[in-house]
Amino acid sequence: MNNKASISPLLRSHDTVSLKYVSRPLLDIREAAIRLGCSERFVRRLVQERRIPFVKLGGTRLRFLDNDLDQWIAGQRIEAIR
C-alpha cells in the first residue's frame, strides 16, 4: 500500500492552515535570543512586559514565530534624522 494514500485520508481541509507552521517551527527562548542577538533574560523581560509577540504552550512553555520576530524587529527601526 502506498504511504501517501494511507496518510491523505487523515488530513481534513482545515488542517492545511495548521500545516503552514510545520515548515517554520516555533523558536524557543534560546533560539529567539540568538535570532535577536540578545540574552535570554532580555527576551524573558520583553515577554513579561508584553513588548514582543509570543505563543504560550502548556501554560509555561514560550515559543516565538520567526515571522513575528521579523515584524517586531522592523517595528523597532528608528529612522535617522537629517
Image (cartoon, rainbow, N blue to C red):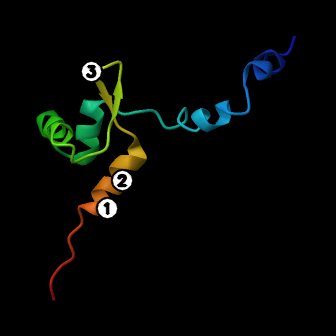
Is label 3 or label 1 in front?
3
CA separation, marks 3 and 1? 27 Å
Residue sticking out furthest to the bottom: 82
x then y, percent, for residue 11: 72, 24
CA separation, marks 1 and 2? 6 Å
Identify the image quadrant of the C terminus: bottom left
Q: Which of 38/48 is in front?
A: 48
Identity, as a three-letter code, of the amino acid under mark 2? Asp
Q: Secondary structure at mark 1?
A: helix
3 and 1 marks in contact (CB < 8 Å): no
The residue at 84%/19% (across/down) is 5
The residue at 16%/37% (across/down) is 48
In this rendering, the count of numbered labels is: 3
Q: Which mark is residue 10?
A: none
The crowd level at tag 2 (other Cα within 10 Å; few <14, some 14-19, many 20+) is: few
**Residue identifier under label 1:** 74
**Residue identifier under label 3:** 60
CA separation, marks 2 and 3? 23 Å
x then y, percent, for residue 78: 20, 70
Is label 2 or label 3 in front?
3
Identity, as a three-letter code, of the amino acid under mark 1? Ala
Residue 8 as seen in the image, left or right of residue 31: right
Specify which label sits upstream in the sequence, 2 or 3.
3
1 and 2 marks in contact (CB < 8 Å): yes
The residue at 30%/54% (across/down) is 72
Identity, as a three-letter code, of the amino acid under mark 3? Thr
**Residue identifier under label 2:** 70
The crowd level at tag 1 (other Cα within 10 Å; few <14, some 14-19, many 20+) is: few
Specify which label sits upstream in the sequence, 3 or 1.
3
Residue 27 as seen in the image, left or right of residue 33: right
